[in-house]
Amino acid sequence: MDIKNTFKITTINVSGLNTILKQEQVLNYMKINKISCIIVTETKLQTASAKMIYKEYKDIMTWWSCDDDNHFLTGVRIIMNNNYAKYIIKKDIIEGQALKLMLLLKGKIRFTIIAIYNFLNNSYKDEILEFYMKLEEILIAEKKLKAKIVCIGDFNANEILEFYTKLEEILTAEKKLKAKIVCIGDFNASYDIAIAQQRANRKIFWKDRIFQILKKNVMIDINLIYHDKPLNTWNSPNRSDKKSRIDYIWVTEDLVPDTIYASTNKVHIFETDHSAVTVYFQIDDLFHTKQLFKKKKHNNNNLKVNYKKIDKISFKNINKIWNTIRDTFKKANNELPKKKESVKNL
């Protein structure tokens, strides 16, 4: 398993991107860890400042979403290596709270990244519940689109009503696209608590309903595929005993075979109370390999994988077997004798 030659997406709540020092530290973190695309949330920037950041760097592209009236509570930024930014065909912005990029990959695969910063607060309970309903409608629509979806960001919210409306419009547009989806970010909710409530036959907390929506739309917590007990992602700066796993990467089940690993790591290069959460995708499968087979348009006899019946262990085994087969073929090809053939005129 070669995790160096992968497409890596990472999300981090940076708790402000206001200083030149932290701006450089974030970029250094991206380069040192060879991250292909990094989503930073809670940037707390106004548009005038956001426009100037990283402007002089030629090897990356960057996009931002700011809310100038509430910049101290909002802000999302995506930074992407130019090797992958060239695949972007469309972007959409929800002021201060979300940023969507659509990539068109080999084989006409649509890969959508949705970066979200959604500040959870009990004062906005009704609005957030409405948001979850809209998000559920979007994901149901996506199921019809063979999309690989990345919903990535820090799931908190303020002034959420307008945000939900605009987010719904963006996702509704995705219905017409065969996209693959990754939902990634700071959910500010605990899946572990939601599971515990469900097992005890108790009603889950309102803010944990996002997990019901993701599961209903056949999405998987990718860290649970690769780790039996994933690490906590948030630690209180004031209380050492207050910690939880509130940052997640959820992917549609058909995207799981394209992953090779997921991880949670401390960010030592700059100060934040969140850990970085990363998913690793196979480059060859998504970016380099041309589509070898196409389904016949009117062939109704094609068999499809029933992802609902594949458990966590099965996914692990499938990925392990596939990686072994792929690496074996590559190794065998490298060891086979080669000869240079001359071109003959016909």
Image (cartoon, helix red, strand yellow):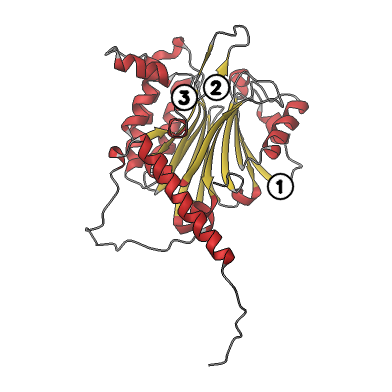
Residue 127, visible in the rendered structure? no
Choose the circle earlier in sequence order: 2 or 1.
Answer: 1
Q: Could you tell me which residue is drawn at 65 percent across and 49 percent down? A: 82
Q: CA distance from mark 3 to mark 2?
A: 12 Å
Q: Are marks 1 and 3 in contact (CB under 8 Å)?
A: no
Instruction: Assign a secondary structure to mark 2.
Output: loop
Q: What amino acid type should be assigned to the residue bearing mark 3?
A: Lys
Identify the residue under disc 3: 229
Q: What amino acid type should be assigned to the residue bearing mark 2?
A: Thr
Identify the residue under disc 1: 59
Question: What residue occupies the far bottom of the structure in this picture?
Answer: 346
Q: Point out residue 273 in the picture as x, y percentages from the top left corner.
A: 62, 18
Q: Closest to the observer: 130 or 117?
A: 117
Q: CA distance from mark 1 to mark 3?
A: 37 Å
Q: Label 3 crowding class (10 Å Cα cut-off): few <14, some 14-19, many 20+?
A: few
Q: Is residue 180 above or below residue 159?
A: below
Q: Could you tell me which residue is drawn at 22 percent across and 58 percent down? A: 300
Q: Closest to the observer: 59 or 321?
A: 321
Question: What residue occupies the far left of the structure in this picture?
Answer: 301
Instruction: Assign a secondary structure to mark 3.
Output: loop
Q: Point out residue 48 in the picture as x, y percentages from the top left corner.
A: 70, 30
